[in-house]
Image (tube, grey):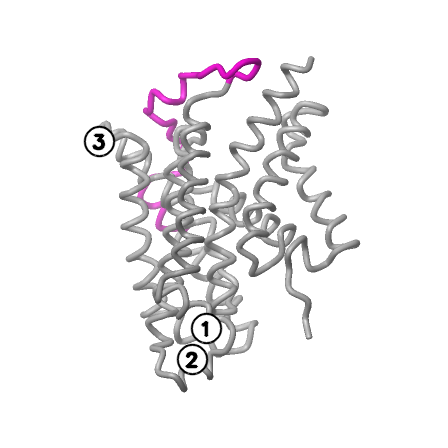
Amino acid sequence: MLSLWLNVLASGILLGLVYGLVALGLTIIFGVMRVVNFAHGEMVVFGVYIGYWAVRLWDAPIIVAAAIAAVVMFFFGYLLEALIVKRFVNRPHHYQFIVFIGLSLLFSGVLLVGFGPDPRPSASLLSFRTVSLGFVTLDLARLQAAITAGVLIALLGVYLRFSSLGRALRAAADNRLGGLVVGLKIPRVYAVTFGIGAACAGVAGALISPLFDAQPYLAVDFTLLAFVTVIVGGLGSFSGALLGGLVIGVAEAIAALMFTPSMKTALPYALLIIILIFRPRGFFGAKEI
């Protein structure tokens, strides 16, 4: 029984790290630009398809597929912000909601037309390999995805903390007008920010491509999952995105063990309601002035 619980908790923690990477992309965009990307789940699914095709066509390792997804999705996010999103950054929130929902529907339609509605199982052999660590047995795909996600989160945190670009992003988030006064190129900062957020989503999608069948309908689940994660952790908080991902990952694993696998999506939403009642800002959300 102890071994079973250890395996479940370990599995939840590993998947939670990937959820944290997904949520990190969403919270970076919101923290700097103050826009809510309702098309974030579609960007994760783009990464899932990139991972699927990289393995299928070139037999590429998942790490290589994740690197491809990072580059492709960064430039996709950069161009999307420069061409469309920047026109709505200073508009009222309901304008932003409409444009991002429209983009979400557009991307889903493109995926449906391009790849069809049928699920495409991963061709990666990682899906069938396991590794034993004492009493815990983990599938290699989940372990590799978690380690990679954890390393990327740490590297991104260090980069945003100490690099000149990171300081520019934090300055734009704290005071946009002040950033303009001191000479920051805010439009470029916003485009890079959106590119980083999209890259986080794409990398997470590629990493979990051995765990999920590639299909357009996953997008809604990942969008909702990202929102639940950032709300639990605290919207706009880097640490909150990571903690929220771990909490949601463990909650899903426990729900699947204690109830039924179909309940694993219900418990995180119940947890969300509890968090909103007792701590509306999430674990690390900033208090509004």
Disc number lying in front (1 or 3): 1
Checking the image for residue 171, the label placed there is 1
Label 2's element? helix
Q: In the rendering, which numbered label is found on residue 266?
A: none
Q: Mark 1 to mark 3: distance in Å?
A: 43 Å
Callout 3: SS: helix
Q: In the displayed orientation, state which residue is furthest to the front.
A: 162
Quadrant position of the C terminus in the picture: bottom right
Measured Cα–Cα span from mark 2 to mark 3: 45 Å
Q: CB of mark 1 within 8 Å of CB of mark 3?
A: no
Residue 47 placement (x, y as % from top left): 36, 43
| Amino acid found under the numbered disc labelled 3 | Leu
Q: State the residue position of label 3.
A: 57
Taking depth in this image into account, of 172 and 49 the one nearest to the observer is 172
Q: Position of residue 42 (x, y in %)?
A: 43, 49
Task: Rate crowding at label 1 as few (under 14), some (14 to 19) or many (20 or more) other CA atoms within 10 Å.
Answer: some
Q: Residue at x 44, y 16 (%)?
A: 130
Residues rendered magenta in the picture: 108-137
Residue 168: quadrant of the picture: bottom left
- Name the residue type under label 1: Ala
Closer to the camera in the image, 178 or 87? 178
Q: Are marks 1 and 2 in contact (CB under 8 Å)?
A: yes
Q: Which numbered circle lies on residue 179?
A: 2
Residue 131 vertical position relative to residue 283 in the rendered view, above or below: above
Q: Residue at x 64, y 60 (%)?
A: 285
Q: Is residue 235 left or right of residue 105?
A: right
Q: Nearer the viewer, mark 2 or mark 3?
A: 2
Q: Position of residue 242 (x, y in %)?
A: 55, 46
| Left or right of residue 1, residue 224 in this image | left
Disc nearer the start of the sequence (1/2) = 1
Q: Where does the N terminus fall, quadrant-wise?
A: top right
Q: How many numbered callouts? A: 3
